[in-house]
């Protein structure tokens, strides 16, 4: 657009390149900003002037990110939204039959499906357990890191971040091996623990993956393990911005570590914790990969969470892309509500503080 | 139908003109092998209409992709290489065509088919299908009709009629049977001897008692695998009690039979193998014979090979997936799945695989030509023999009935008593795979302590719904 505004001296600019005719083009140069005729300006200069004058700089800078997000997230989301109101299946996706608009029928079918409520319950309980656990463990490790010397701090944070950097599939496969009923080290160790520690021979051959509670126990441990380092490092970054006078003052006033944390550290870092809680909720509520591997492909319907439920709607025979899209939208709406809740809480607390 | 078939055949003859000419041209030089005679006869008879096509040489596709199910097996790879050589000799126009075999785990097959169809990427030209998949996949439009090809193929008339009928919907055939197979109980003769079991069990009570004896003789092992995710095997218990899974009336409406007393007896017995008789392990709940859904090795198959499991149900083909370090393969034998009260064995699910041309393959004719070589009487029979299956040709089954040793005894006996319905119903894969898994989920809940009556009743209602409506 801007490049097309190049015009030969004396010739009128092409219409498309002169929005509102305010371009510093020879005959209409009324701004006085450029002393030389427009024909002597390079394209770069002309573009620069136009951008500054119109105040479009920020928007231009936003353009690449918006384009990427639009192409990769917004457009697919619009498609999913459309599918959720259609009977979109194999025949439609392969173009054999046209898709038909069926109103809210997909949504009502989803909301009347007991499997949906079952998997929603699993997702909610899982997030309720994993999010606080991850935050607590991550914060404790963050508090530990800030007390360590520089070398030890580097060592501990790098070790922890390795867990965070482990790909979800690798982590899941490792955990499935750990809890394998045949050769897994967890059953082996539990069977050898004394009974007052909860061990005993009944753990030998215990299957962790074929019932909801044990399977999600394994997933909880795994997601806390892979999730806490991010929390720890972020909390560490927050802690290092704390003014040391405040902490000293608290110590002088006789506050112990517990009191100092809740009265000084936590209120100051509250925005950080809110963002971390929000991100963790989104990650854990929408968990798919780990659950898919640990619960054994799609072989165990009773162990579905929302992610597996959606996937099974779309990718088992016969595929119901419309139903799955509706389920995906329900999940999105739930997460939006959570997000709005967090943001409101953040604003409220920010104004009170 | 006869008329419709013939006109379709004429169309195919015109379309296949180049291929027909090529075969006609070379049939004399290759007719010494039975494979070549198999396909060249019909082509020769139609070559008069194709004689005007001047050039047929090396116009085939660069690659033909064949999707095989399961995990790669070396002997089957050798067999396939041999087939490809024959294919190149028999059809010189495909001399430069590479044949690529892709192994698809059984648990992923429907997903992969759907993805191939919807994305148009990485599509197979030929796919193997379980015979229970064929009605569903034909209905969902991923398979090309084969009527015209079949009507001019020499193999058609020799195929077992029932197997071909399974692949036909409203007069259109979408796949050809490639092999058949049945399940039986695997055991080891040396273990039976040590446990003091003198004859193989023929009733449920004997099966359970023998499992207990084996567990006592071999402490730390599991007697039997009461897995939940293999309805093809579990069906034999229902049928062996005289029950049914679901039945269809003359109007085509399905009724669930899970709450019938005879079927309930089978469910109770099977669940009780784990809960009360304690001859199965908790890890088998939620598993197939190869471990978790989608796995291609592991589970009871591996445990039996490693000597951790004394008896288990699987097909004769499963010998190929036994682990390499299996303890004692020489003593492996089989007996048919017992019925409730004996002495005749329970009916078994007549399983097997079909070959079909993928609907969106750009190489329809070449794909069929390769199938015609893979599935000719000689090649399908040699494939069946090396993999522990039955040939899809009546004459070949009759000829091989008395070959094979102790290992095949149970399977051969079982094969005489096969049943497919309702496992080949159009909506069966929806009911028994993926998100619904009706019978596996029911068995799992029962084994994990759910109340019997309400669980079975709920599964029964859902089963009838799905079979009737598809969702």
Image (cartoon, coloured by chain):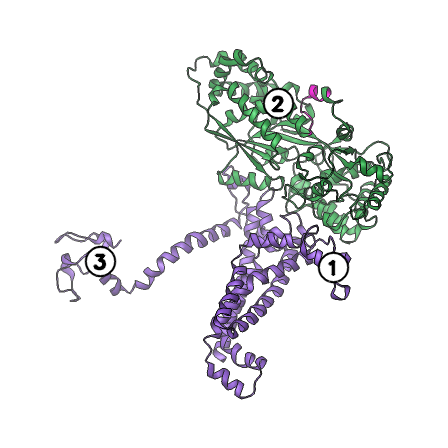
Which mark, residue A44? 3
Callout 1: SS: helix
Chain to which mark 3 belongs: A
Q: Earlier in the sequence, mark 1 or mark 3?
A: 3
Q: Is residue B260 visible?
A: no
Rendered residue at 44%/23% (across/down) = B59
Q: Is residue B226 magenta?
A: no
Judge whether B253 appears above or below A33 on screen.
Answer: above
Q: Which residues are magenta?
A: B388-398
Judge whether B279 appears above or below A228 on screen.
Answer: above
* Same chain, labels 1 and 3: yes
Of B43 and B8, nearer the camera is B43
**Residue A86 at what x, y percent from top left?**
53, 47
**Residue B7 at what x, y percent from top left?**
54, 19
Rendered residue at 77%/57% (across/down) = A201
* Distance CA(mark 3)–CA(mark 2): 73 Å
Q: Is residue B185 visible?
A: yes
Camera-side mark, 3 or 2: 2
Q: Which residue is mark 1?
A: A192
Chain to which mark 2 belongs: B
Q: Is residue B392 magenta?
A: yes
- Relative to B81, B430 lies left or right: right
Of B4 and B242, nearer the camera is B242
Q: Which residue is mark 2?
A: B379
- Relative to A4, A260 lies left or right: right
- Relative to A303, A57 lies left or right: left
Callout 2: SS: helix
Colour of chain A, in one word, is purple
Mark 3 near mark 2, Cβ–Cβ under 8 Å?
no
Q: Which chain is depicted green?
A: B
Camera-side mark, 1 or 2: 1
Judge whether B282 appears above or below B136 on screen.
Answer: below
């Amino acid at each position: 657009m801007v490049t097309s505004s190049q015009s030969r001296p004396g010739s009128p600019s092409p219409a498309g390149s002169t929005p509102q005719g305010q371009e510093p083009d020879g005959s209409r140069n009324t701004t006085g900003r450029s002393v030389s005729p427009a024909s002597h300006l390079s394209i770069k200069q002309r573009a620069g002037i136009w951008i500054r004058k119109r105040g479009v700089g920020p928007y231009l800078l936003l353009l690449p990110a918006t384009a990427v997000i639009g192409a990769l997230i917004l457009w697919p989301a619009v498609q999913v939204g459309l599918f959720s109101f259609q009977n979109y299946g194999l025949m439609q996706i392969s173009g054999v039959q046209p898709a038909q608009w069926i109103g809210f029928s997909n949504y009502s079918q989803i909301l009347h499906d007991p499997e949906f409520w079952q998997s929603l319950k699993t997702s909610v309980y899982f997030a309720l357990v994993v999010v606080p656990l991850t935050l607590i463990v991550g914060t404790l490790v963050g508090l530990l890191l800030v007390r360590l010397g520089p070398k030890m701090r580097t060592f501990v944070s790098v070790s922890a971040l390795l867990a965070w950097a482990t790909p979800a599939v690798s982590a899941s496969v490792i955990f499935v091996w750990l809890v394998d009923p045949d050769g897994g080290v967890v059953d082996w160790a539990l069977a050898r623990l004394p009974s007052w520690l909860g061990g005993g021979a009944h753990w030998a051959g215990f299957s962790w993956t074929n019932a909801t509670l044990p399977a999600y126990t394994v997933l909880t441990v795994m997601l806390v393990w892979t999730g806490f380092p991010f929390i720890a490092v972020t909390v560490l970054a927050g802690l290092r911005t704390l003014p040391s006078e405040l902490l000293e003052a608290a110590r002088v006033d006789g506050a112990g570590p517990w009191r100092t944390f809740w009265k000084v550290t936590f209120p100051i870092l509250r925005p950080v914790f809110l963002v971390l809680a929000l991100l963790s909720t989104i990650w854990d509520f929408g968990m798919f990969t780990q659950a898919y591997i640990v619960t054994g492909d799609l072989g165990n319907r009773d162990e579905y969470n929302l992610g597996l439920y959606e996937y099974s709607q779309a990718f088992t025979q016969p595929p119901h892309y419309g139903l799955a899209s509706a389920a995906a939208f329900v999940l999105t709406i739930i997460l939006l509500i959570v997000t709005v809740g967090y943001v409101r809480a953040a604003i409220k607390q920010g104004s009170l503080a | 139908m006869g008329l419709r078939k013939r006109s379709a055949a004429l169309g195919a003859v015109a379309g296949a003109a180049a291929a027909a000419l090529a075969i006609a041209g070379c049939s004399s030089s290759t007719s010494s092998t039975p494979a070549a005679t198999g396909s060249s006869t019909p082509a020769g008879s139609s070559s008069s209409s194709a004689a005007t096509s001047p050039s047929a040489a090396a116009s085939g596709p660069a690659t033909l992709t064949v999707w095989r199910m399961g995990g790669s097996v070396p002997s089957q790879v050798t067999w396939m290489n041999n087939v490809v050589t024959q294919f190149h000799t028999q059809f010189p126009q495909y001399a430069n065509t590479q044949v690529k075999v892709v192994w698809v785990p059984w648990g992923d097959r429907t997903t992969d088919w759907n993805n191939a169809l919807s994305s148009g990427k990485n599509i197979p030209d030929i796919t193997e299908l379980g015979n229970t998949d064929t009605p569903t996949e034909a209905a969902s439009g991923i398979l090309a009709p084969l009527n015209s090809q079949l009507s001019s193929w020499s193999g058609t008339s020799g195929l077992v009629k029932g197997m071909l009928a399974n692949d036909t919907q409203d007069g259109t055939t979408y796949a050809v049977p490639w092999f058949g197979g049945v399940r039986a109980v695997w055991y080891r003769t040396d273990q039976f001897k040590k446990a003091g079991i003198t004859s193989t069990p023929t009733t449920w009570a004997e099966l359970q008692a023998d499992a207990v004896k084996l567990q006592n003789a071999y402490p730390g092992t599991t007697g039997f695998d009461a897995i939940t995710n293999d309805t093809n095997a579990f069906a034999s218990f229902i049928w062996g009690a005289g029950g049914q899974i679901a039945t269809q009336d003359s109007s085509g409406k399905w009724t669930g039979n899970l709450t019938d007393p005879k079927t309930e007896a089978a469910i109770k017995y099977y669940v009780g193998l784990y809960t009360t008789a304690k001859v199965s392990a908790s890890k088998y709940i939620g598993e197939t014979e190869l471990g978790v859904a989608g796995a291609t090795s592991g589970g009871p198959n591996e445990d039996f090979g490693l000597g951790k499991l004394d008896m288990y149900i699987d097909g004769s083909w499963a010998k190929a997936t036994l682990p390499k370090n299996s303890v004692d393969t020489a003593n492996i034998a089989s007996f048919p799945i017992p019925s409730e009260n004996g002495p005749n064995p329970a009916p078994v699910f007549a399983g097997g695989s079909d070959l079909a041309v993928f609907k969106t393959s750009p190489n329809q004719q070449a794909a069929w030509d390769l199938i015609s070589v893979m599935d000719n009487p000689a090649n399908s029979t040699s494939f069946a023999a090396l993999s522990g299956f039955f040939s899809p040709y009546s004459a070949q089954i009759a000829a091989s009935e008395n070959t094979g040793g102790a290992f095949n005894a149970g399977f051969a006996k079982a094969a005489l008593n096969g049943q497919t319905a309702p496992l080949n119903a159009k909506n069966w894969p929806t009911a028994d795979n993926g998100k619904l898994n009706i019978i596996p989920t029911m068995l799992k809940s029962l084994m994990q302590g759910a109340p019997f009556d309400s669980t079975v009743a709920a599964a029964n209602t859902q089963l009838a719904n799905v079979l009737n409506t598809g969702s």
